[in-house]
Amino acid sequence: MKMARTEIKFGGFGGQGIILAGFIVGKAVSLYDKKEAVFTQSYGPEARGGACAASLVIDDKVIDYPYPVSPDIMVIMSQEAYHDYVPKLKEGGILIIDEDLVSLDDIAKRAGKIYKIPATRFAEELGMKIAANIVMLGFFGYVARNLLTTESLKKSVLESVPARFRDQNAKAFDKGYKYAQETIKGE
Amino acid sequence: MATTYIIKDDEKTKKWKTPHGELYIIKDRCKGCSFCIEFCPKKVLVESKEFNAKGYHPPELQEDETKKCINCGFCAMICPEFAIFSEADAQSKDIAQIPEKEYPIPESPKIPEIKKARDVLTGEHFWNGDVAAAEGAIAAGCKFFGGYPITPSTEVAEHIAERMPQVGGVYVQMEDEIASIAAVLGAAWGGAKSMTATSGPGFSLMQENIGLAVITETPCLIINVQRGGPSTGLPTLVAQADVMQARWGTHGDHEIIALAPNSPQECFDLTIECFNLAYKYRTPVLLMMDECVGHMTERVVVPERSKIHLVDRKKPKGEPGKVKIYEADEDLVPPMPYAGEGYNIHMTGLTHDERGYPSTIPETQERMIKRICDKIRIHADEIIRYEEFMLEDAEIVVVAYGITSRVVKRAVVMAREKGIKAGMFRLITLWPFPEKKVRELAKKVKNFLVVEINYGQMVLEVERCACPSKVHFLGKMGGSVHTPEEVLQKITEVTK
Ligand code: SF4
Ligand code: SF4
């Protein structure tokens, strides 16, 4: 897989595991796919409730400037994050949302493609609401399959959660991934 | 006893009559910590079954035990929420005395068994700069951390607190930064490679004892993950505004070694380097990180242990009793005895002679200052490290360090794309300042641009050395990094 500098932003509210989601993808790209990745997160009041964000820059080449300029992909899991960050999405970029938590308006028109998943609902159905981020990552993994390998991503998920929750998280990941396979057609 | 409280015995406040007064519990204030239950010397309190407004079970006085309450007030003293208190009847004040033997002897907490772990975690990791620095210290053989966690350096302490016990080292959370640095110096003399990590406010508090480290020639590492100041400033937002304080923060003539990493990998590598420099030159060394570098996560490659070069102290060659602890070799660095090895060690912050004895003779002061400064000055070339990027044909040199250097690199590439011959000179060693190199560059290049997250600090140093070139400045007060576009615009402007 060849790739140019790609910027990904994860946004939601504190407690959804947004930061961990970004970290997991970064680790997958950096350690398992052996590409360059820089992961940064928002600190300060933002991180204490309210909108919270994690950013990832990935590239084939060594990355100098570590912050996103106009993200190519945004994964958004709260309405507040939607309003805060989506105006900076690259024109024609990819927008991924939790459809139960985010409703779209005109801002979303800048997105070239929009993918929706009820990630939190799925996680609740699986009996582990806190794994909504992992369901989302499964879904993201399919959407971004040209950027990083699914094996790496799944490995990174399993290595980043406590051993006793591995099975559950594997299920959550697969749920999101399968849902993407089933619903995203013609690509 | 007259009371100033207005207490109703209702569903929110419970009141018990005790032999010598009353006991009150304001139920909704309770946060269920059980301290009162634990510390009551009579063990008359228990957790109740009911929930309070916060969802906790407030304590209650066991009905059949009310007679045992002695109104000692321990429960009130220990309660963090002011939720429980007792009031003694005026006539029975004396009762509130507990016979000595009834003080509870708290059981000492069980220390969980600590699994030993490797000190050098050879392999690839996805670490942030703070964690990478902590691991670098452990890989360098650091065995003592005394600190007072402060953001954005907290993760250094947090990570080391977990790791130190695994490698047979010690983490001590001190009461403040003054004590932290003092403990670090003590540990070094006791024979442990030692360090602390802090940010602006803590760095200010440490200055006096950094001076003590300089004059007692104590090797140690101080990490400063810089945030915006002065004073409390910008907790957890970036700045590079302590770089002059690093140079001159402690009083009196001295030299200091300070390095500035720009990636988690360098946080790891340079932490090891800092320890090596500290032990080679018997001096405190500063690792001047910034919030951005501390909090960014990237791949960090940890080499095999055998590939990590470590410098240890120079041991005294002479017999105990015959060695003077400040008698230097030709390199101006005295060998270092450790406490307990039999050598006579006299340590003082006063000006001292080679034996370490205080002296007010001007010649002694002159000799001491010269040597502790010159031991760094004469080795400046060996100590100094920098990175040159596209400098060969550069017509403008952009000087940067830390996180800013990564912005500048981007801007330099963008400038080249526009046909502007820009290059970057990155300071890895901030102090001693790479004066010689800047003078050399100034012979070839007419324009320098210093980009840093402050209102003008290292730019003064560049101005001092870059004569006759023009030195321009692009600052930022702190809180965020420059954008590559901002730097590019400035480059374009000054090269017009
Ligand atoms: S006043 Fe003393 S004896 Fe009475 S409940 Fe409080 S701690 Fe226990
Ligand atoms: S000490 Fe105070 S807050 Fe803690 S359980 Fe007792 S009453 Fe509640």
Image: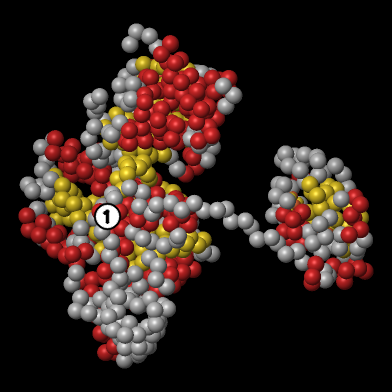
User: Residue B375, relative to residue B19: is it above or below?
Assistant: below
Q: Where, quadrant-wise, is the N terminus of chain A in this rendering? A: top left
In the rendered image, is residue B428 in sight?
yes
User: Residue B260, relative to residue B383: is it above or below?
Assistant: above
Q: Where, quadrant-wise, is the C terminus of chain A in this rendering? A: top left
Work out whether residue A118 or residue B45 is closer to the camera in this orientation and state it. Answer: B45
Answer left or right for A132 relative to A30: right
Q: Position of residue B383 (x, y in %)?
A: 21, 64
User: Residue B251, relative to residue B311: is it above or below?
Assistant: below
Q: Position of residue B345 (x, y in %)?
A: 39, 83
Q: Position of residue B99 (x, y in %)?
A: 82, 71
Answer left or right for B190 relative to B283: right
Work out whether residue A43 or residue B47 is closer to the camera in this orientation and state it. Answer: B47
Residue at the spot of label 1: B306
Q: Position of residue B31 (x, y in %)?
A: 71, 47
Quarter occupied by residue B335: bottom left
> Residue at image x 38%, y 85%?
B344
Query: In the rendered structure, which amino acid carries the disc numbered 1?
Result: Ser
User: Residue B359, relative to residue B226: is it above or below?
Assistant: below
> Residue at image x 18%, y 37%?
B414
In the rendered image, is residue A53 in sight?
no
Dot 1, how many residues are within 10 Å of its Cα: few (below 14), some (14-19), or many (20+)? few
Queried on whether the Cβ of the residue with tag 1 lies below 8 angstroms from ligand 2, the answer reads no
- State the count of labels: 1
Q: Secondary structure at mark 1?
A: helix
Work out whether residue B190 or residue A3 is closer to the camera in this orientation and state it. Answer: B190
> Residue at image x 33%, y 82%?
B325
> Residue at image x 23%, y 65%?
B432
Q: Residue furthest bottom?
A: B361
Chain hosting mark 1: B
